[in-house]
Image (cartoon, rainbow, N blue to C red):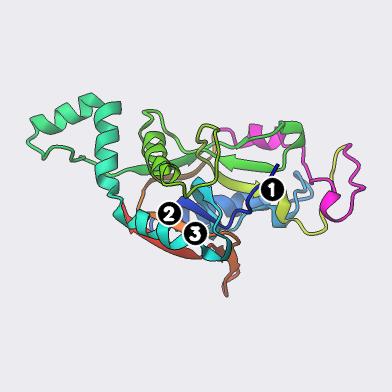
Amino acid sequence: MPPRPTPTHFLCIPLVTAKSRQQLSTSLSSFRADVTSLESFGVPDEAIRPVGTLHLTLGVMSFPKNEGLEQAVALLKTIIPRQILADVTASTLPDKQGTAKAAGELPGSLSSPLSVTLKSLHTMQSAAKASVLYAPPVDTDGVLTRFCEKLRSAFQEAGLMMEDTRPLLLHATILNTIYVKGRRNSGGGGGRGKGKNRDKLTIDARQILDRYDDYTWMEDVPVEKIAICKMGAKKQEDGDEVYEVEAEIDV
């Protein structure tokens, strides 16, 4: 069986904008101060993701030596997000389209842009042995998810995205223990391994998830860009970290 390709890039919705930065900075700073405190949960500080890294991943790509990247960038530039959003809204919220027509708006137009609210805190693993915690976007009408699925499908159909048959799970990673240096497993896992075989650091996140179940990280932030970014966030002079943008389009 051939080895799985190494991810090099990803398609995403960046979440840090002029409107969201203050909201995210405030909410993340509060979260960091709480969960890293030895009087609280004692989570290693490096596990908390920097504000500039927050995004919603739509899919992962592998372009060794950038082979295929140019094709992906070209495809991105052909996409018209507003049209995709109008089509999704028409099929998901037909009543909204009917209201728009009655108001004399152009076919496919939208009375409001797509926006994102991040609320709550979840994990993809067992809460008692978690390594990643994420904030899901509020998507009660399903429009955001369908919009992102359409974007992902365009790259999948072009053969530019790594194969992934799982349903799209939109999430903004808030905590990831993989970034903790010298990490070793906690809570009965042993942590005896070295190098590539060492155990993943896990935390008992049950009380953290309970505390932040109703927590709002950012609210009603318009989606501004769709981007192809390079794996590996880069440290900035102000201490933040950001992913290098290979290409982006406006929404």
Q: Identify the magenta region.
A: 188-213
3 left or right of 50 in image: right
Residue 91: image location, x then y, percent: 27, 27
x 18%, y 40%: residue: 109
- Main secondary structure found in the magenta portion: loop
| Foreground label between 3 and 2 | 3
Question: In the figure, residue 62 lies in which quadrant?
Answer: bottom right
Label ID, residue 229: 3
> Could you say which quadrant of the image residue 83 lies in?
top left
Number of marks: 3
Q: Earlier in the sequence, mark 2 or mark 1?
A: 1
Rendered residue at 55%/33% (across/down): 166
Q: Which residue is mark 2?
A: 20
Cα–Cα gap, marks 3 and 2: 19 Å
- Residue 212 falls inside the magenta stretch: yes
Question: Is 51 placed above or below 239 here?
Answer: above
Q: Tell whether 36 sits left or right of 65.
A: right
Give residue 90's position: percent from left, percent from top: 24, 30
Is the residue 87 above or below the residue 21 in the image?
Answer: above
User: Dot 3, crowdedness within 10 Å: few (<14), some or many (≥20)?
Assistant: many
Residue at disc 3, secondary structure: strand
Residue 166: say if magenta: no
- The amino acid on which the numbered mark 2 sits, given as a three-letter code, is Ser
Alpha-carbon span between mark 2 and mark 1: 39 Å
- Write the residue at 63% across / 54% down: 6
Q: Which circle's residue, 3 or 2, is located before the other in the chain? A: 2
